[in-house]
Amino acid sequence: MAQSSLVSRRSFMRYAGTAAAAVPLLSESRALLAADGSHHVDPDTGPARMPDANAVIVSSNENPLGPSAGALAAMSAAMRQGGRYHNEAKDQVVEAFSRSFDLKPGYVSMWAGSTPGLDMALRWNIGPGKALVVGNPSYEQGPRAAEAMKAPLHSVPLTPAGAHDVRAMVAATRNVGTYYIVNPNNPTGTMTPREDLLWLLEHKPAGSIVIVDEAYHHFSKDEPMIDQVIADKDIIVSRTFSKIYGMAGLRAGFYIARPDLQPGSIFRVGPAAMIDGAFQVSMATAHACTASLADSSLVPTRRKINADIRDATLEWMDKRGYKVYAGSQANFFMVDVKRPGRDFAALMQRQNVYIGRTWPAMPTYVRITVGTASEMAKFQTAFAKAYDTAPSMAHAELPYDAPSELGFVA
């Protein structure tokens, strides 16, 4: 892909043209969401406040390249018709995605981000007598769903290689409604092998379902699980445009399952999701999605950019003896900072670098998003200085509330 098609976070306004005037930028979306008390916020940092424009933000698993040039052009052209509803724009995205995987009609629905559909998938088959089984550490949307539905939660440690331990997950309980697998896993970036997921589908209790959250799958070269949807297995796959496509602030995601597992069939748990607009995708976003799917070079090019910068950063850390959680195939990784992660984040913020949060299972590890090459160079300088600072016995106060994807949606 030509360099002109790679758009940085700070040059988005320059490229977006008329679309930028109508579509909120990610930074603006953060501010709006932070002011809305109904949204979840990072348990480590509280409601998000934006740092200054020169800050290095590697906390939220965003793609600093932003939407592709083709997506920006498609949005700009589409905005001329912005006075119309144009629901068919979303249908065109669904059709394009379905064709790419040979999915039959009715097997894909599109949402304003992957989170609303994923919430419905997580909640409909669990409850007081039907457990949710998740990996630990992993993305917190599963535990939040179990809490909301008053369902037993079984949190199973990852394997030493960072995979979901599917055999231990099946052994955890027979009264299970749903298994939730994040692949690549958030926060470790590690993969659960496809053969393990196939084993889970074959050995899970009758009546249970498997949800595979593939938000970061484009960064991996492993095979996805969408073919198991085609085979009509008890599986729901979730995808998003927020990550490799660089469209976190534009809100678009896919819910992929056979028709009887689609939201229209499991509506009893959440019709309000439709009423509240979670099913609605803006016309500009839909056109950007279609343009992104049509660009066959976009995913492999961005996958390589991410891998090159990630691997260079990990090589730098390895040479200096920092302990990194091995095996990430995503646009983030975890590193042991040998002290409470919040304290280390405070030291980084004083250098205008914002890193990700910690997980209770790994309290001294922090998650780092892969930024641009220049951002990661600044990160390295700040990281070395913070690491060499003696740990404080007192709990550090964060100068600002670091932006995090947990307070928003995927």
Image (cartoon, rainbow, N blue to C red):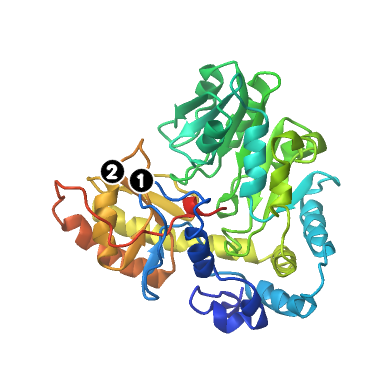
Q: Is residue 207 above or below residue 335?
A: above
Residue 256 lies left or right of residue 384; in this view the side is: right
Identity of the residue drawn at 61% across and 48% down: 115
Give the image quarter of residue 227: top right
Q: Is residue 254 above or below residue 88?
A: above
Point out which mark residue 364 bears: 2
Query: Label 2 amino acid?
Result: Thr
Query: Label 1 amino acid?
Result: Thr
Identity of the residue drawn at 56% across and 80% down: 13
Res 366 visible: yes
| Label 1 secondary element | loop
Verify CB contact (< 8 Å) between mark 2 and mark 1.
yes
| Label 2 secondary element | loop
Give the image quarter of residue 200: top right
| Residue 184 pos. (x, y %) | 53, 45
| Residue 66 pos. (x, y %) | 56, 69
Q: Is residue 72 above or below residue 140?
A: below
Q: Name the residue under label 1.
A: 358
Q: CA–CA distance between discs 2 and 1?
A: 7 Å
